[in-house]
Structures are given as C-alpha cells and as structure tokens.
Amino acid sequence: MNLFEAHNVVKKYANHLALDNVSINVPKGSIFGLLGPNGAGKTTLIRIINQITAPDSGDIFFNGEKLKSHHVEQIGYLPEERGLYKKMKVGEQALYLAQLKGLSKKDALKKLKYWFEKFEIQAWWDKKVEELSKGMQQKVQFIVTILHEPKLLIFDEPFSGFDPINTNLLKQEILYLREQGATIIFSTHNMSSVEEVCDNIALINKSKKILDGSVHDIRNQFKGNTLEIQFKGKPNLLEATLTPDYEIVENNFANDITNIKIKLLREIKTNNLISHVLPFGEIISFREMLPSMNDIFIRAVEETNEIDNKKQIL
C-alpha cells in the first residue's frame, strides 16, 4: 500500500512550467529517491507535499486520503536550506521546535536527551547555533525533523556538510527509521547514496517524470550486456576480439590480477563465454556489470534532452 501518491500533478509559475503531469507512488515503509537535475521540479513537488504551495491541477493522497492541512503534522521535512535560528541556543531551539510539532515539554526533553546522547552532542545544548559548523547544525535539524515520529519523512540533501564518518552515521539512522516503519522521500544528487539506501526512485527532468521503478529493476533495464572476468596473472587472450559474439572493451593488469570487461555482441549464454575463455587462464571471478545509478541518471537526462532539442528543431 502507498503512503503517498501524486496523480498527474501540474504546477506553473508565471511562464515557467515546474511540474508537467507528474505522478509518483511512495510505498509504505520504503525509501523513495526523488531525483533530477537542478531546476527539474523536485523542490516544487516537495513544497506541494508540505502544503507550502498547491498544485494547479492533479490529486495528492496521503495514507489513502486526499491531502489536507492536518496531514502536515504527520510529515517531517529536512530542507536543503537549513532553517535554524542562529542566535538561539541549540537546546532551547530544539525544545521549541519539538513543541511546535505537538510534543509536550516533558516528552520533548526526554526524546531530545536520547538523541543528543546518541549523536554525542550533549555539549552543544547551551551553544548558539551560529557557533556550530554546517554539519553540526544539520545533526540538530535532523533530530528535530524526526523527533515527533512522523509517518512520512522528507530529506532534501541530508548529507550536505557532512564528512564521510557522519554521512555514514546519518545513513544508518535513515535505514533504521525505515526498519521502524517510517516512509522516506529522499532527494539527493549523490547517486551512490541512492544505490545504498533507496528501494524505489523517480527521475524528473525539465518538469516531467522520465523514469521510475525499483532501483534493482532500473539497473537491470539499463544494463549493457557487459561482463567482468578476473584472471590470475596474464591470460593469453586475443587482443581485439574473442569471437564475433564477444568483444574485449577493457583489459587491465595489476597485482598479478587481470580485469577484463567483455561486451556481448548478440544474445548468447554466459556459459558459452566461460567455456571459450577458460583455456586462456585461471578465472578467479566472473560477474555481470550493472550500470551505476550515476551512469543511468546521466544517460536518461541526456537522452530526454536530446529528444527535446530535436523536437524544437522540427
């Protein structure tokens, strides 16, 4: 069942079409990647979900009901542009924001104590926000976003300003929130993070959705029939091509290991390939190469841009 659905959403600003019949379904208990280049329309959709603005047409559903004002209490939003008051003390502000989300002072203090200890930031309680680094401010805002345990969490570039250690810490917390039943919309330009945490994605470009589905299915959809074989030592392979069925596209040797990437030129069984190369050397690994989400992102955007340019010329 979907926690959130958008059906044919359209949003215009003056002469700019921000969203053009965009539809997405976010399953309950999943992490959904909302992807796209800058200016694609992602932020507009997030603003609509948070009821900061409204669509010109289309329908929005939250937990099976049409989106209404009271649903905002069940949504936690961590924006890319941070919104903490720089002159306020960290603890005072966190307590204030938690109470705005409907928590009693007693419950807010209890939960804040737990999260400040978990993130080892107790010493920041009486510091002003302006004294903290961008990454430290991000930790505080992350805590405030999740504190009231909303059904839907929206993270817009949540790792911005973090070093690798703290990025991994936050990543693990996001995965834990999913395990606890939270539904998460995750917007980022970091495609490696998408592969690590997202179950499903939608890719928006120039106001239109151009791709959606599970990360697994999309990577298989874009695979290029390329295999990687590792040999011990240097195999005695023909340099340019193996047979009319296969082509060597990359051949690297290091530390007594040869990595060879082979492209299948027609529909053949991988067993036939293994049988063909086995006499040339000792195989230590064999795997199908799936494209990264970064490669898919670039390819899908470039292809749609190329189609749009041809339409303009015609």
Image (cartoon, rainbow, N blue to C red):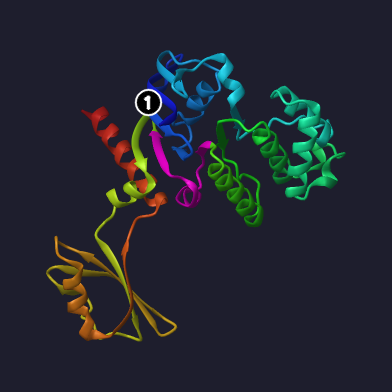
Q: Quadrant of residue 133?
A: top right
Q: Is residue 32 left or right of residue 309?
A: right
Q: As rendered, which of 261 and 16 lies closer to the eye?
A: 261
Relative to 244, is 98 above or below? above
Point 50% across, 43% down: residue? 189
Q: Quadrant of the C terminus?
A: top left
Q: Position of residue 154 (x, y in %)?
A: 55, 33
The secondary element bearing badge 1 is classed as: strand
**Is residue 137 or residue 179 the one in the foreground?**
179
Q: Mark 1 sits on what residue?
A: 22
Q: Which residue is at a point 41% across and 85% down the rendered structure image?
A: 256
Quadrant occupied by the N terminus:
top left
* Direction from residue 192 to residue 265 in the image, left or right: left
Tell me if 261 is positioned left or right of 41 in this view: left
Q: Amino acid at mark 1?
A: Val
Query: Which of the 4 image quarters holds residue 211?
Result: top left
Residue 188 forms part of the magenta stretch:
yes
Estimate how packed mark 1 is, as few (under 14), some (14 to 19) or many (20 or more) residues with alpha carbons within 10 Å: many
Query: Looking at the rendering, which quadrant does residue 7 occupy?
Result: top left
* Start-end of magenta stretch: 183-204
Q: Is residue 9 magenta?
A: no
Residue 78 lies, in percent from the top left, at 62, 34
Residue sitting nearer the eye, 230 or 68: 68
The residue most toward the right is 126
x and y, in percent, of residue 15 in the image: 42, 16
Q: Nearer the viewer, residue 107 or 191?
A: 107
The vertical placement of 270 against 206, above or below, is below
* Residue found farthest to the left: 244
